[in-house]
Amino acid sequence: MTLNRAVRLAQRPIGAPTTGTWRVDEEPIPAIGDRQFLVRIDLVSLDPAMRGWMDDRPSYMSPVAVGEVMRAGAVGTIVKSSHPRFREGAVVQGLFGAQQYAVSNGAGVTPVDPTLGTPAMYLGVLGSTGLTAYFGLLEHGTPRPGDTVVVSAAAGAVGSVVGQIAKIAGCRTVGLAGGPDKCKLLTERLGYDVAIDYRTASLRHAFAEHCPDGMDVYFDNVGGAILNAALANLAMHARVVICGAIAQYNEREAPPGPSNYWRLLVNRATMTGFLVFDHLAEHATARRRLAEWVRSGQIYAPDTVVPGSLDDFQDIFSRLFTGANVGKLVLDISGRP
Amino acid sequence: MTLNRAVRLAQRPIGAPTTGTWRVDEEPIPAIGDRQFLVRIDLVSLDPAMRGWMDDRPSYMSPVAVGEVMRAGAVGTIVKSSHPRFREGAVVQGLFGAQQYAVSNGAGVTPVDPTLGTPAMYLGVLGSTGLTAYFGLLEHGTPRPGDTVVVSAAAGAVGSVVGQIAKIAGCRTVGLAGGPDKCKLLTERLGYDVAIDYRTASLRHAFAEHCPDGMDVYFDNVGGAILNAALANLAMHARVVICGAIAQYNEREAPPGPSNYWRLLVNRATMTGFLVFDHLAEHATARRRLAEWVRSGQIYAPDTVVPGSLDDFQDIFSRLFTGANVGKLVLDISGRP
């Protein structure tokens, strides 16, 4: 019988993950119990949040234990089932982990509806990154027509969708990204009105130039110096949405916090943290709307699907943090050409 | 004719105000124009926020200009008037400045209603500090019965009122103050369920002990390390209210920001800044409710009214920052015994 291959956490990284962080184990495929099913995984999601799951500190989920299969979103096909609602042959998305085979009881599992999008889209624009953009912006950023919405990591899986939903909501959008290629993508493909290359621009001057009336919404994926500069440029009653802090996930020591938090008072503004899991009841509706926007061309959702094996996991994961990646990053382990 | 004496900003302080920061000028009492009135000032309010008004940087009000009369809340008696709504003999409260006589057109001026409270109370529990406590807690903290509400600078003019309103709202209250005397005041007079002496306690341990389920509301008057420690102890969906940052007003360099802002995401929490001026339409109602609570004994509003002259201004102002002050601090320049 075929063995399972699984990426397990070998040791907690200090700073960026290295070759010793994970190991790939070969092991028997577990048997399914009552009301369970076995998924053969084709696509493994690579997300910045996964770095946070590896640290042993309080967070919104328990950390991945050393020795445990690395937690990851994935899409696969059910190859065996004793579950009445999940049939063999169905394609499903869930937190199946970075491995070839996973056993599930169906908790948190979403069937892939091919009329809405491709399996890879279920890890991106129709999956947790698209839903994160949707709820973060619409529920917590509460954009109004005419608002100036500023997004960091604007070419990333979440940021690329945030900007386009903000345009649909009638806003003016300003995206931050690193390098001329990404900035070009922002304005030419992702509908941003303005792109700021944070690597070359003085953020203070760029914000003053492109947000002369301040930011009504600042959607933060990066933390660090960019968040702090944004806080100094808020409009009255601005909404700051804390979605991620990719600039500091690999930091060895706690980076300094945003000293300009004080501007929340000056501008009667709000800074809110949220998680996409808090809106489960609305996921299906949101997914349908996102699929419609993709179909109508109002949302362009770039992705980078890298064919490879689980042995490439660390190498491909690291692309999330080097600035090399655009849009949703997915590892395709199906072996299909 | 009597001259006016006025405390004018002589030079912007770097760090804490010193003897050269203000000068006291003797000058003619200005004539009143049409629809204006002249106030003889009895009581001058001393508030931490005044320190912020002295720095030349963007804030919610323009900074006091060098040479200008120091902006300050005050209560006095109208001694001359050409204004139909403000009669001679009326006692009024307003931003009249640190001086003996002020001319006003009535903007932002509130008549003192002696059935509600004393003139000094109109600078404290019935004035901007009491109203700040009221709106900051009730509108932005949205306390619910059973919530744990934590307040920094809990023996101060704002914090002393916040804790008592939180008790009225059915909450459990934890106050932070410096030194055993203030902590005793918190629990014995100000209704706090728990007092934490931030000078001696490990905040991490104290919060873990006294807020085992986290803080539902954290009302921050201080900023700095206490804010950062509080952010690490939030309950789910906590509300952090940014009211002040007294710990850093006199800092020469921007202090580090709260690196634990990230917990807003983990706990799906919100950090909001507000100003009491944003709720002007509701001030009268709030003032009546506060007066009722004082009358019924549900709110004890300590104040420190220091008789003196404008020459004592800097000396008395500095008490706000040394930890020496309890409750509302007022300078009485009336010369009445």
Image (cartoon, coloured by chain):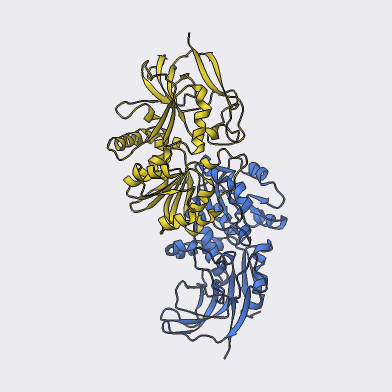
Chain colours: A yellow, B blue
Looking at the image, residue B174 sits to the left or right of residue A185; the answer is right
Q: Quadrant of residue B41?
A: bottom right
Residue A37 in the image, given as x and y percentages of width and height: 43, 17
- Which residue does the image show at 38% across and 28% down from the upper left? A120
Residue B289 in the image, given as x and y percentages of width and height: 49, 61
- Which residue does the image show at 68% across and 57% down from the upper left? B182
Residue B229 appears in view: yes
For residue A87, above or below residue A196: above
For the N terminus of chain B, the image quarter is bottom right
- Which residue does the image show at 46% across and 23% down from the upper left? A308
Residue A124 appears in view: no
For residue A321, above or below residue B161: above
For residue A207, above or below residue A153: below
- Which residue does the image show at 49% across and 66% down from the upper left? B61
Residue B151 in the image, given as x and y percentages of width and height: 59, 53
Q: Quadrant of residue A21?
A: top right
For residue B293, above or below residue B75: above
